[in-house]
Amino acid sequence: MPDTPLQGVSEVGSSAAGGEGLLDGLADDAGLSDDLGGGVEAESELRRVEVNAAQHGSRLDRALVDLVPEFSRSYLQQLLSQGLVALNGQQATKAAARVKAGDTLTVEMRPTLQSQAFRPEALPIDVVYEDAHLLVVNKPAGLVVHPAPGNWGGTLLNGLLARDAKAQLVPRAGIVHRLDKDTSGLMVVARDRTTMDALVRMIAARTVHRQYLAIAHRPWTGVPNRAVQAPIGRDPRNRLRMAVVNLDTHAGKPARTDIRWLAGNDLGCWVECTLHTGRTHQIRVHMASLGHPLVADALYGGAPAAGLQRQALHAYRLSFTHPVSGQALEFRAPLPDDMRRALAEWGLGYNPS
């Protein structure tokens, strides 16, 4: 059901700067594939190591892991595949090649894009609340929250590191939950480790309340309020997607979204979604499972419409008790212009409570 209004309500102003998932989804896809940087030869380090008796007869890739243990197997395999490993002075590319005691391995250690991802970048950040312990920011659509393959820079995390020196002392610059790249709206960010740990506990205990506004395809039918309780896991047919799954046969986690119909017509519907859990793509998956994919959400069956080219989802309300002061806080972010225009084109009203 919708949350009860709290004290200290703040209306968030718009800004020119301007997945909903929890901490457990931050690094879902943060593997090391395609992470070797180009044009960084000047920063490379040459490491020479000698194969000892313990590695005699081992595969080259396994010997590398033993001899250069501070780096991951994945990273060393990438160096090998790119010709950056020499065996007795000759370029080696075959992981299965056997090594002998006394052999010399020369490894060109190049920095990775991942290793350089956590660096400050001056970016516009719409900060709607700030104190000594936390920030609340209004993320625009198109901004990636956390570095990952394909987006090692230009993320909210990079902007936070540039904005505040304290962010470098906190894991993930204080990010405790995330929004998908094309979802807009409110996020809370910790400014110190104690506050971060408290917010993580609050999110797990479901005492950080988040509500979203969404525009979806197809007319709404049936009761205006629905509580969707359907487990979510990786789609077994498409690993890039999430899906409602049967926990008896597939890995997944319980998920609950309360959906309230606000307006609708033959073109589609305008709804408010309240999260009770924070699974990856939760609202997008649950709405699609009801036969109402979000407008422009191609991954889950939506199509561009009413001028929208990104999924029509906005985190408009965030409320919680301040983990240090105990003050009840509530923030609301105005609907972005692209969603306002879409509502007007479809003749749907803007009337969240």
Image: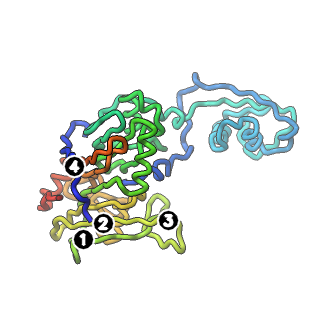
- Residue shown at the point (67%, 33%) measured from the top left: 84
Residue 242 locus on image (x, y percent): 44, 62
Q: Amino acid at mark 2?
A: Asp
**Closer to the eye: label 1 or 3:** 1
Residue 47 locus on image (x, y percent): 71, 27
Residue 103 locus on image (x, y percent): 83, 33
> Badge 1 is on which residue?
225
Q: Secondary structure at mark 2?
A: strand
Q: Quadrant of residue 129?
A: top left
Q: Quadrant of the C terminus?
A: bottom left
> Badge 3 is on which residue?
252
Separation of marks 1 and 4 at Cα, in angstroms: 26 Å
- Callout 1 touching callout 3 (CB < 8 Å): no
> Badge 2 is on which residue?
258
Q: Nearer the viewer, residue 272 or 10?
A: 10
Q: On the rendered structure, is 269 left or right of 139?
A: left
Q: Amino acid at mark 3?
A: Gly
> Badge 4 is on which residue?
7
Q: Nearer the viewer, residue 277 or 307?
A: 277
Q: Earlier in the sequence, mark 3 or mark 2?
A: 3
- Residue shown at the point (53%, 74%) measured from the top left: 248
Q: Earlier in the sequence, mark 1 or mark 3?
A: 1
Q: Amino acid at mark 1?
A: Asn
